[in-house]
Amino acid sequence: MTYQAVKIADRVYWVGAIDWTLRDFHGYATGRGSTYNAYLILADKITLIDTVKAGFEYEMLARIASVVEPEKISYIISDHAEMDHTGALLTTMERVKPEAVFASAMGVKTLAGQFHGDSGIRAVKDGERLSLGDLTLTFMETRMIHWPDSMFSYLPEEKLLFSQDGFGMHLASLERFADEIPSHVIEYEAARYYANILLPFGTRIAKVLDKLEQSGILPEIIAPDHGPVWRKDIGWIVGKYREWIERRPKRKAVIVFDTMWGSTEKMARAISEGLREAGVSVSYLPLKTCDRADLATEILDAAALIAGSPTLNDGLFPTMADALTYLKGLKPSHLLGAIFGSHGWNGTGADEIRKYFDDMKIDLIAEPLKVNWVPVWGEGNDDERGMN
Ligand code: FEO
């Protein structure tokens, strides 16, 4: 017994790799691992869509070999040049010796940079069709979903859209279809992926969705480069993308903070209780137990961000600097904000948060709440927990 391909359409097989132990994807904590999806089209010209991360070549080639000898592949398409999909491209090219490898123009340029020279990869244009003999692929540029080189490939005969990072999620599983996995897992991991990977590119994604609709492309299968394939839930995931792009926040606030001697934590707890009294749902994120990817995920449907930090060495607590630097890069929009923190002899921790909020264009609902030393709240109970 060895790795097997999984049929996802009459003429298409999943031949990717499962990374069960991945726990960090460029700074995004991936608690459920991931998959690097590659797909094999059994056309006259046998075609491989994307490859896998370096180190997973054997698994991909074994899955291909369960269907067809890898040397029979004529074409390789690189829909996305990021290394989780191209780390194995050169070794695959050396093994398979395909007639041609195709990528977008930006993909050719990006891969030349990564591979230190021209690897003979050919550029295809937006809207270009490639005959595979008895089947056809159409390419669609999708810049910044997730990199400038990114493109979708569409196989009209199977109504199958290869969407690389789009509609993906970091989720290692043996099930290959989203409808085979508990819906709460799918909903959480799809949202976490969008928040941590695609959040800055909502406007571009909206244009791609519009373009798909206008061009009459109505895929019955969407095959992303991470996580499960969509076949029964396409309306649901496309609707979710529309919702996330349009920003439809709930009556929800995210409280993110760290604490040094428990005083900023006391403030966070008081704020959370106050919000609950006011009927606001709270996502409570102490950075000793949560991380930056949790923050990005929780922001996706929140109306407000409330951030707290003690002052350490005249500045921000390091975990807060980490989380806010990460969040700033994801360009969240339309958030209201509030800032709090405890300090001893100066309150620059809260001031540092304000700089991040200004950069993220988060509107403050009030001046930062700074408490000198220990706040008066929850006396008694907290003493027992050693917070004072
Ligand atoms: Fe899955 Fe942008 O790489």
Image (spheres, rainbow, N blue to C red):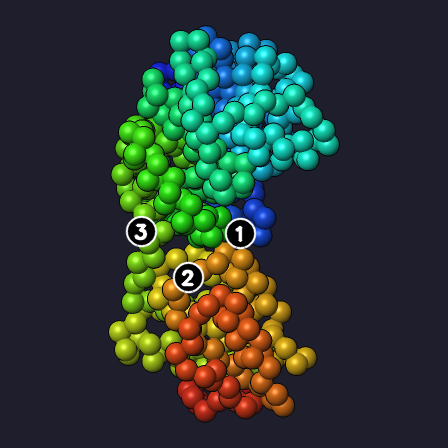
> How far apart are labels 3 and 1 at the CA level?
24 Å
- Find residue 76 and report its horizontal and vertical position in percent: 55, 20
Q: Badge 1, how many Cα within 10 Å: few under 14, some, many 20+?
A: some
Closer to us: 331 or 303: 331
> How far apart are labels 2 and 3 at the CA level?
14 Å
Q: Name the residue: 67% across, 31% down.
A: 112
Asked which quadrant contains residue 101, the reply is top right
Which one is closest to the eye, mark 3 or mark 1?
3
Mark 3 C-beta to ligand 1 under 8 Å: no
Q: Are marks 1 and 2 in contact (CB under 8 Å)?
A: no
Q: Amino acid at mark 3?
A: Glu
Q: Is residue 53 left or right of residue 38?
A: right
Asked which quadrant contains residue 12, the reply is top left
Q: Which mark is residue 333?
A: 2
Dot 2 lies on which element?
loop
- Sequence-earlier tag: 1 or 2: 1
Q: Are marks 3 and 1 in contact (CB under 8 Å)?
A: no
Dot 3 lies on which element?
helix
- Sequence-earlier tag: 2 or 3: 3
Q: Badge 3, how many Cα within 10 Å: few under 14, some, many 20+?
A: some
Name the residue carrying label 1: 29
Mark 1 C-beta to ligand 1 under 8 Å: no
Q: Is residue 1 above or below residue 178?
A: above
List the single residue furthest toward the right. 116
Q: Is residue 262 left or right of residue 270?
A: right
Q: Name the residue: 30% across, 34% down.
A: 214
Q: Name the residue: 42% across, 87% down.
A: 378
Which one is closest to the eye, mark 2 or mark 3?
2
Name the residue carrying label 3: 243
Q: Name the residue: 56% across, 46% down.
A: 25
